[in-house]
């Protein structure tokens, strides 16, 4: 590919798009954790995440969620709408795990009595700290209206994803979303993949996501391949 690279992230490259309203994103094989401190090249990861995320975005779009996805180019590349990323990550949790379990002393796997949403500041330098609504609006990262829209969209997306993953025999434990501003709207951007979600096999609780890499639990891509296979057959 010869498009001009505009930005290189940890797991994707953003290139100039075919017109002024779009970018081309290209998935990389790099896996990172702990804000980039742990890093490894995993051959085939880009392809897997690209395929998984595209299938999920297409499903969400069919169900009324606006996303940045315009057109899939090949195994690892897609044209996406140019959007100004809102610099917070939106995290939805159905089951206690990860930082939630650690911070609040709730054992991993505990079902939550209600779905939780939280925001973190998108900043590797600062370690993506959790940030609340009044802090986000005080700094000017997003308006109160934008925050309530993103939270409502995140909950709608959770409902749609829970229904889809239940059919696949997978428990959607938690996930992270990113949104961007494009054409006066807030749309879903970035990716939804085993990098950004916790997926547990519904029967065995086997981890099918990046925690296998974060915690050195074995062949991380085995789970990614399983998620793709089940998504293709749902
Ligand atoms: P956490 O339990 O570590 O806060 O993670 C919550 C969810 O967000 C989990 O599904 C993994 C995802 N996530 C990311 O996508 N990027 C990140 O930088 C972090 C820390 C978590
Ligand atoms: N995405 C973050 C990183 O690459 C952390 C994570 O997903 O655990 O460092």
Image (cartoon, rainbow, N blue to C red):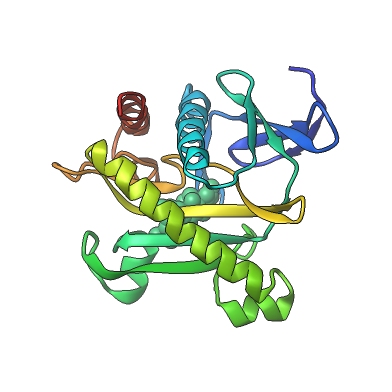
Task: Please tell me which residue lies in front, 124 or 7.
Answer: 7
Direction from residue 112 to residue 89 in the image, left or right:
right
Where is residue 152? Give x, y as percent.
Answer: 50, 64
Q: From this viewpoint, is residue 128 visible?
A: no
Q: How many marks?
A: 0
Q: Quadrant of residue 209?
A: top left
Direction from residue 222 to residue 41 in the image, left or right:
right
Q: Quadrant of residue 141?
A: bottom right
Query: What residue is drawn where x is 51% and y is 32%?
Result: 54
Quadrant location of the C terminus in the rendered image = top left
Q: Quadrant of residue 97?
A: bottom left
Quadrant location of the N terminus in the rendered image = top right
Query: What residue is drawn where x is 33% and y is 41%?
Result: 164
Where is residue 128? Give x, y as percent.
Answer: 57, 63
Query: What residue is drawn where x is 26% and y is 36%?
Result: 168
Task: Please tell me which residue lies in front, 132 or 79.
Answer: 79
Is 99 rendered above or below residue 176? below
Where is residue 59? Give x, y as percent.
Answer: 45, 37
Is 118 rendered above or below residue 47? below
Outermost residue to the left: 203
């Amino acid at each position: 590919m010869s498009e001009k690279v505009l930005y290189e992230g940890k797991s994707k490259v953003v290139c100039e798009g075919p017109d002024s309203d779009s970018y081309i994103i290209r998935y990389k094989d790099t896996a990172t954790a702990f804000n980039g401190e742990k890093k490894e090249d995993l051959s085939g990861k880009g392809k897997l995440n690209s395929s998984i995320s595209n299938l999920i975005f297409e499903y969400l779009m069919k169900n009324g969620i606006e996303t940045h996805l315009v057109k899939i180019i090949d195994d690892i590349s897609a044209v996406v709408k140019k959007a100004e990323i809102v610099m917070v990550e939106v995290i939805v949790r159905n089951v206690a795990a990860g930082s939630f379990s650690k911070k609040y002393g709730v054992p991993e796997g505990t079902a939550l009595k209600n779905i939780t949403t939280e925001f973190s500041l998108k900043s590797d330098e600062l370690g993506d700290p959790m940030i609340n609504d009044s802090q986000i609006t005080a700094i000017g990262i997003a308006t109160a209206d934008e925050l309530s829209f993103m939270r409502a969209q995140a909950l709608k997306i959770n409902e749609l994803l829970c229904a889809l993953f239940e059919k696949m025999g997978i428990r959607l434990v938690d996930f992270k979303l990113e949104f961007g501003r494009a054409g006066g709207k807030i749309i879903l951007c970035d990716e939804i993949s085993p990098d950004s979600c916790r997926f547990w096999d519904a029967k065995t609780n086997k981890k099918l996501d990046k925690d296998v890499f974060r915690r050195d639990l074995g062949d991380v891509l085995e789970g990614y391949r399983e998620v793709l296979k089940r998504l293709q057959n749902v």
